[in-house]
């Protein structure tokens, strides 16, 4: 069987040209200017067909984002937040580590580090000033671990050390995804609860960043 060179579950599904895929369930929802597609891979048969592990893959498509529509950006942000809450089972006490994957020196791969640079981190505030902040904010920390070519260390190895030290409850990874369609660039977001195999979309599989490898749930958000 040929390899599917894409990170997007909706594109892997499109290769079947509307045919039903054994072991895969697909649901679509249309909002104003936004399409949400939920691809659920149910079993090993679905894994083989899609080239992705069993789990949930939710894609938000909003073509109007390319026009920098601020109202649409706000609506997409709300939809994204609701999906994260749904699949991550967040509580007020959930401690989150946000990981910006990718190379900040290379524009197509810099999404993760750029997002992390805009994250409001609060773990230090919760730890060192609990009287002032208490339960008003969630504990959030963030890291951009770089890439193997810069650090000489696999990202999964770096994260394993960080997780063992600070003990978050959940990791949210941010990464640039490979797509087969130009029109999906900057207009499509995929959220998955199966973590990430870096480089898999271009056939460059390395150590995985998953619940199995790190011991805590991993939510991957990609664009």
Image: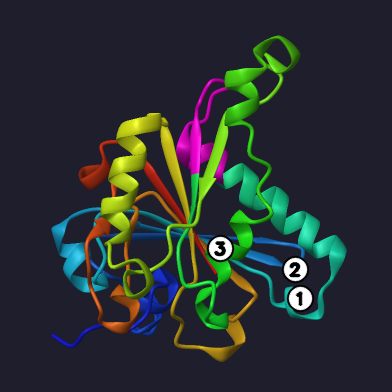
Give the residue at the far top of this rendering. 131
**Is disc 2 in contact with disc 1, using a CB cutoff of under 8 Å?**
yes
User: Which residue position holds label 3?
Assistant: 113
Identify the secondary structure beneath mark 1. Answer: helix
Q: Does the magenta stretch include residue 89?
A: yes
Front label number (3 vs 1): 3
Say which residue appears at 64% left-offset and 32% top-offset.
Answer: 122
Identify the secondary structure beneath mark 2. Answer: loop
Q: Is residue 196 visible?
A: yes
Front label number (2 vs 1): 1
* Frontmost residue, 143 versus 38: 143
Q: Is residue 36 visible?
A: no
Name the spot of residue 113 as percent of width and height, x first: 56, 63
- The disc placed on residue 33 is 2
Say which residue appears at 46% left-offset and 73% top-offset.
Answer: 177
- The disc placed on residue 64 is 1
Identify the secondary structure beneath mark 3. Answer: helix
Say which residue appears at 36% left-offset and 41% top-offset.
Answer: 162
Label 2, label 3: how far apart the Cα atoms are: 28 Å
Residue 71 falls in image quadrant? bottom right
Magenta-highlighted residues: 84-97
Say which residue appears at 42% left-offset and 36% top-offset.
Answer: 170
Mark 1 is surrounded, within 10 Å at the Cα level, by few (under 14), some (14 to 19) or many (20 or more) other residues, namely some
Residue 29 falls in image quadrant? bottom right
Front label number (2 vs 3): 3
Name the spot of residue 144 as percent of width and height, x first: 49, 57
The answer to which of marks 3 and 1 sits earlier in the sequence is 1
Q: Does the magenta stretch include residue 126?
A: no
């Amino acid at each position: 069987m040929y390899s599917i060179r894409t990170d997007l579950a909706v594109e892997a599904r499109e290769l079947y040209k509307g045919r039903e895929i054994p072991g895969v369930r697909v649901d679509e929802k249309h909002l104003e200017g936004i399409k949400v597609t939920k691809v659920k891979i149910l079993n090993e048969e679905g894994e083989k067909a899609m080239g992705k592990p069993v789990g949930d893959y939710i894609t938000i498509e909003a073509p109007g984002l390319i026009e920098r529509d601020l109202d649409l950006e706000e609506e997409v942000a709300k939809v994204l937040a609701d999906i994260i809450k749904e699949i991550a089972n967040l509580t007020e006490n959930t401690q989150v580590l946000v990981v910006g994957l990718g190379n900040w020196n290379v524009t197509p791969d810099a999404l993760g580090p750029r997002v992390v640079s805009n994250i409001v981190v609060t773990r230090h505030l919760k730890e060192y000033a609990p009287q002032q902040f208490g339960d008003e904010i969630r504990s959030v920390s963030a890291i951009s671990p770089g890439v193997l070519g810069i650090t000489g260390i696999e990202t999964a190895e770096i994260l394993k050390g960080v997780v063992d030290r600070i003990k978050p409850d959940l990791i949210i990874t941010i990464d640039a995804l490979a797509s087969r369609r130009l029109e999906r660039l900057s207009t499509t977001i995929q959220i998955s609860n199966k973590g990430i195999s870096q480089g898999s979309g271009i056939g460059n599989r390395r150590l995985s960043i998953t619940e199995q490898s790190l011991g805590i749930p991993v939510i991957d958000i990609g664009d």
